[in-house]
Amino acid sequence: FFSDYSMEQLVVGDDPASDIVRQDAPWFQEMNLCGQGWINEVPNWWDKFCGELGHNCTVTTLDISHTVPTQLQMHMLHGALKANSSVASLKINYCRINDLVISELADTFVVNTTLITLQMCGNDIVGPGLDDLISGVLETDCLTELDISRNPLSADAATSLACYCASSTSLKTLALANTPFTPSDLEIVLSEVPKSRSLRGLDLAGLPVDILGLTEYMMEKGLEALRLSNTCSGPIASLHIHRLTYLDILGHPMSQGEAACFVHECLLLENHLQDLRITFHDPKLGDPAVYQGFNEYLTTKKSQDLKALTVHGGFGSMGNNVVAGSLMENTTLTGLNIVDAGQTFGDDNAINFAKAMMWNTSVQHMGLVNCGIVGPSAINQFCLMLPKTRTMVSLDLSGNRLEEDALDTFIGALTPNHPSLCSIAFGADQQVMAHTAELLCLLVQENSSLTSLHLHGLAFGDKTPNFIGSLLINDTLRRLTLSKMRNFYTDALLQLIVEHKSLQELVIEHSKITFPNQVNLWAGAARSGHLERLLLTDQKEPAPHSVVQRAFCNMYWNSQRRQQPPKARIW
């Protein structure tokens, strides 16, 4: 089978109609080679690919992240991009590329005016190459997004970036997360931000940001998106956020007093936030100034633009109850995630949130992840909520170790169709009893609205083949996550991959599948007529590139020939 099928068919097929790069069809706009290590093993394929890419008019996104192309291969890619007039986004994250490669890429931007997004996260770029790249980019000044996060950038690189920010008239987003910049290096870059005529977004996660200094620059520059995850130094409440639409301060070490100041001096003043992500490190005490402020924020026009809210740590036991009540009145929020609230959340607060969803008319996704939900009382309330909600599309209760009765009740409530609910996630590293496995079989057989099912950490034991067999009856499921699969279940998994008529994405996590059985599963993926993504995690010995290569080719074709526009992402 493998000897008759080559990756070269991705570029030059058996006939002109199968030439993937030359076809003028909208569903060939994205070329995703992320993680495909076989490109080093098939150099002739890469040569032909670059040759075709040079005069292609269809591909708009090229992603070769998590591969290790040689310097010669990158040289060929640069030549193709110089001649190309369609690629707008290039992603070369975690490819071990260095300054020499980046210096050569600079020539591409001198002649190419269509490439506007460049992501180079997680490489070995220090500085000299970046200086050359910026000089080339400024020749045409068309780049709108630059991501150089997680590179070992030097102080000279900070000077180059500062010059770029001040000179560019098109750069809108700059990502510098987790680079080794010192406070003085970062100051050099940020001091030039007010001079930029186009910059709207900054990613400074993991950097030693001086909040007071940053606020001074923000007051002069209208930033719209800011990511400060795991940063430090300075009171977060001093941020000037009234123009921001996106703010991520997850992991920022705020005390109770700082959290209260942030709520009252930032959120309750004029702002236009659409996506807020925040961490409360000491939720046990539940400061009334914090949760009452959030209650006011969510129930008034001050949050009229807010669409997505993520809170790590929760608001404390009493605070969670108050915030749940505010959701009954809120009509704008579409996505809500409470994460790692633990025992301060528990069943009582879960009941209140489930009741709130019975009245809420806007939330489409709710995640209560690792929130200490265990008992049937909370689950019973969710069961009452499910038939009454009209807007909820996705529910995530993963990380909550439900008691046996609660788990059975929850699965039973999901079995009847709920027309709006199509994505469910639950499970927390536990063994499923035989009767619970039978209920799950019934769920996937009878629920025709479910398109995404994620069973995190659930082990079915000897009922696994029965459950996988029941999945073959379901013709609506598109995405499935299973855990703790063992070698003696691979025959059933192989049957699922090859025969399921609608499954597009399969993730097998926390499973120690042996090398020969991995090869069998990848071979099944190469024969599947529907599967677009297969992910096997926690494997001691990964399958060889030559096997993955053929599977990728077929899954790529599966995704392209659907001729369907990309589905909108809810959260």
Image (cartoon, rainbow, N blue to C red):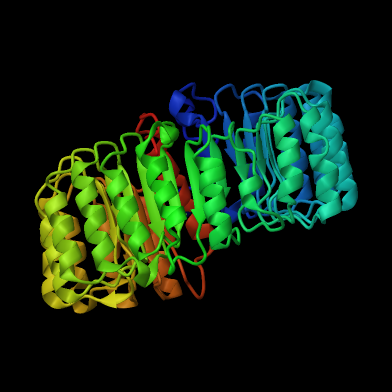
Residue 339: which quarter of the image? bottom left
Quadrant (top left/top right/bottom left/bottom right) for the N terminus: bottom left
In this rendered view, identify the residue nearer to me: 546 or 187: 187
Whether residue 125 is situated above or below residue 455 in the rendered picture: above
Residue 33 visible in the displayed image: no
Tell me: 155 left or right of 342.
Answer: right
From the viewer's side, name the closer residue of 524 and 570: 570
How many circles with numbers are drawn on the protein? 0
* Horizontal side, residue 247 vs residue 477: left or right: right
Name the residue: 63% across, 58% down.
230
Q: Nearer the viewer, residue 326 or 549?
A: 326
What residue is at 23 percent from the left and 48 percent from the top?
356
Q: Is residue 16 visible?
A: yes
Q: Position of residue 503 (x, y in %)?
A: 28, 49
Query: Residue 539 placed where, x, y %?
Result: 47, 72
Q: Residue furthest front?
A: 289
> In x, y percent, where is residue 82?
75, 27
Which corner quadrant of the image does residue 83 belong to? Answer: top right
User: In the image, is residue 253 above or below residue 457?
Assistant: above
Image quarter for residue 297?
A: top left
Quadrant assignment for the C terminus: top left
- In the picture, measured across the screen, residue 480 lies left or right of residue 272, that is left
Observer-nearest of 388 and 210: 210
User: Residue 286: where, in percent of width, then height?
Assistant: 42, 63
Relative to 350, is 452 above or below? above
